[in-house]
Amino acid sequence: MQPKPILPPRLVSGATVALVAPSGPLLERDDLTRAREMVEAMGYQSRLMPHADRVYGYLAGRDDERIADLNAALTAADVDAVWCIRGGEGMNRIVHRLDFDGFARRPKPVIGFSDITVLLLSLWTRTGVVTFHGPMARSPMPNFQRWHFDRVLTTLGVPGTLGRPAPAPEVLVPTAGRIFPLHGGTATGRLVGGNLTLLQALIGTPYFPDLTGAILFLEDVNESVYRIDRILAHLRLAGGLDGLAGVAIGRFTDVGSNTGLGLDEVLDTYFGPLNIPVAVGFPFGHIDDQWTLPIGVEAELDADRGELRLLEAAVR
């Protein structure tokens, strides 16, 4: 079973947000400026970690530099949240060097997605502190994405259906896009997941989460259907699909296929026999306007209605 979640403090006006690049290098020099400006426009103070602008091949600096920035941000008493500027590649090179004990002593929101899945899942698995699968700090913040970010991480961080604002009582729907059931029904469980490729990369390590009774959420980008098939096969062989309560599939963007099989057919191959609720098309992943999903929080999936409801707050 997943541990009882430890809720980090909510973000408040004036909070200090550390900006880190623990994986790939920034794509443009302006990314640093955009990240700082966005954080400050949201009412927070930004703190750019010293090595965030480094480049070492396909990494944002050498391993020692990246883990130094990350551990300093995770454990600093005067840092209120850690927000990643980019994913890319490289978090799995340094995950074993994370200061889990130091982070557990001072829990704080940690935000990002894609390669940052390794960071989010390892912190949740080793400490029980809720982490946040959400937009990168350098990304634009459209209204829907900002509202949802605030709803989960600030004074709006209360239980309710994920989606856009609606009059009370809360009956909320997702942002534009079709969500459809592969298998209907409802389920409750802790939200756990992230990028499918990076979840696979944790199999057999101390950082792979216990998915028993979980609502597993998945997204990915630039993966051919046959590769997604192979990853899901590995996950099934490793027992990762055993005991799931439900599955929420986000966006699999830029998917290529010349196999004659569609993504829905492959998803159904692995999730269909489980006889649990599965819905496809939720707004998270490598898209411009996405939800912020708290890892470790109890949630309810209604596959027929295409809804995902938080049953408890994600911050305190």
Image: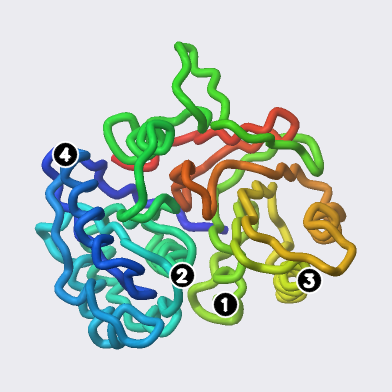
Residue 30: image quadrant is bottom left
Graded by Cα atoms within 10 Å as few (under 14), some (14 to 19) or many (20 or more), the crowding at tag 2 reads many
Q: Mark 2 or mark 4: which is in front?
A: 4
What residue sits 34% from the left and 74% below the top?
25
Horizontal arrangement in the rendering, residue 134 relative to residue 14 (left or right): right
| Amino acid type for the residue under numbered disc 2 | Val
Please report whichever mark, 4 or 3, sits nearer to the chain's N-terminal start.
4
Question: Could you give the CA–CA distance between mark 4 and mark 1, rounded to whole angstroms?
Answer: 36 Å
Q: Mark 4 or mark 1: which is in front?
A: 4
Question: Could you give the CA–CA distance between mark 3 and mark 1, rounded to whole angstroms?
Answer: 17 Å
Residue 49: image quadrant is bottom left
Question: Could you give the CA–CA distance between mark 2 and mark 4, rounded to whole angstroms?
Answer: 28 Å
Q: Is residue 177 above or below residue 120?
A: above
Question: Residue 201, labelled with which disc?
Answer: 1
Quadrant the N terminus occupies: bottom right
| Amino acid type for the residue under numbered disc 1 | Ala
| Amino acid type for the residue under numbered disc 3 | Tyr
Q: Which residue is mark 3?
A: 226
Q: Mark 2 or mark 3: which is in front?
A: 3
Please report whichever mark, 2 or 3, sits nearer to the chain's N-terminal start.
2
Question: Residue 118, labelled with which disc?
Answer: 2
Check the image and tell me how it is coloured: rainbow
